[in-house]
Image (tube, rainbow, N blue to C red):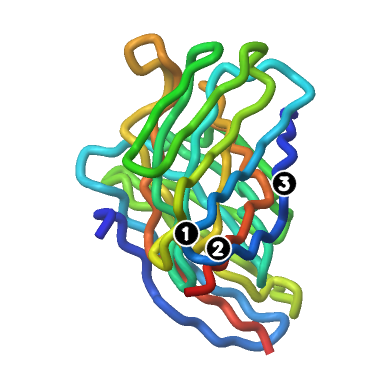
């Protein structure tokens, strides 16, 4: 158990709909990352938040948005859903950004994921 | 942004054989991380390498960072069925951006 929680575990919805995925980071972690993993694919970085602020964007579609709340939980909103949006969505958290003893960034702890199926 | 190529995509081995996956970048990396994802599971952090030429070991796993800090490898000695899964390398920047390799999926035949 990584300490990162994600809800719901599974989500089935229709094309054109909007869904919200929720992530609670490990206690004390300020940084939250969102990833998309399609079937047999690698992990595509979507977006990263640190202490409530957006810090980095990856290959996130305009139909997708995210935010991190004052209690540090994060939500990923997916709208106008298409069949191709069906995937596993992972959230990960890390302690902070910046240097760790001068050695680089911190490791990420992943949640169990939300499996989204768009029909 | 920074890209990382990971090979091979798949590796099938007999239990007891060795396994190696490689990550290569065209640019110099400040660090590289390795993760393992079991079938049906989520990625789990294994290790981070930072120094040029660094070698770290975790039991049967050996991780290396190239002298030029442009490549890295993960080697498993005498694979076991518990080693099955997909192994990813990852590059993370202080700015927050994260790039994962496409992963190498390892299957082990008992």
Of residues A74 and B14, the one drawn nearer to the viewer in this rendering: B14
Residue that mark 2 sits on: A77
Q: In this view, does A27 lie above or below A100?
A: below
Q: Which of marks 3 and 1 is nearer the N terminus?
A: 3
Q: Mark 1 lies on which chain?
A: B
Q: Is residue A89 above or below residue A43?
A: below
Residue A86: horizontal and vertical position, in percent?
66, 76
Of residues A39 and A90, the one drawn nearer to the viewer in this rendering: A39
Q: Which chain carries label 2?
A: A
Alpha carbon of mark 2 to alpha carbon of mark 1: how far?
45 Å
Q: Quarter of the image holding residue A1? A: bottom left
Residue B63: horizontal and vertical position, in percent?
48, 32
Crowding at dot 2, Cα within 10 Å, few <14 / some 14-19 / many 20+, comes out as some
Query: Which type of secondary structure does the marked residue at label 3 adopt?
Result: strand
Q: Which of the two marks, 2 or 3, is nearer to us in this view?
A: 3
Q: Looking at the image, how many numbered discs can be counted on the residues?
A: 3
Residue B54: horizontal and vertical position, in percent?
48, 17
Query: Which type of secondary structure does the marked residue at label 2 adopt?
Result: strand
Crowding at dot 3, Cα within 10 Å, few <14 / some 14-19 / many 20+, comes out as some
Residue that mark 3 sits on: B7
Crowding at dot 1, Cα within 10 Å, few <14 / some 14-19 / many 20+, comes out as some
């Amino acid at each position: 158990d990584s300490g990162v929680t994600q809800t719901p575990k599974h989500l089935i919805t229709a094309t054109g709909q909007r869904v919200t995925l929720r992530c609670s980071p490990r206690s004390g972690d300020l940084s939250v990352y969102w990833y998309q993993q399609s079937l047999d694919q690698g992990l595509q970085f979507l977006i990263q938040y640190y202490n409530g602020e957006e810090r980095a964007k990856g290959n996130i579609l305009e139909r997708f948005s995210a935010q991190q709340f004052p209690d540090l939980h994060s939500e990923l909103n997916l709208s106008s859903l298409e069949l191709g949006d069906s995937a596993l969505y992972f959230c990960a958290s890390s302690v902070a950004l910046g240097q760790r003893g001068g050695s680089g960034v911190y490791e990420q702890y992943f949640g169990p994921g939300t499996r989204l199926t768009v029909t | 942004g920074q890209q990382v190529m990971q090979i091979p995509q798949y590796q099938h081995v007999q239990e007891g054989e060795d396994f190696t996956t490689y990550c290569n970048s065209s640019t110099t990396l400040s660090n590289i991380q390795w993760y393992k994802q079991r079938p049906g599971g989520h990625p789990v952090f294994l290790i981070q390498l930072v120094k040029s030429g660094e070698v770290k070991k975790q039991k049967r796993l050996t991780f290396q960072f190239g002298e030029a800090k442009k490549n890295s490898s993960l080697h498993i000695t005498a694979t076991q069925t518990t080693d099955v899964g997909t192994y990813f390398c990852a590059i993370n920047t202080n700015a927050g951006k994260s790039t994962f390799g496409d992963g190498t999926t390892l299957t082990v035949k008992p």
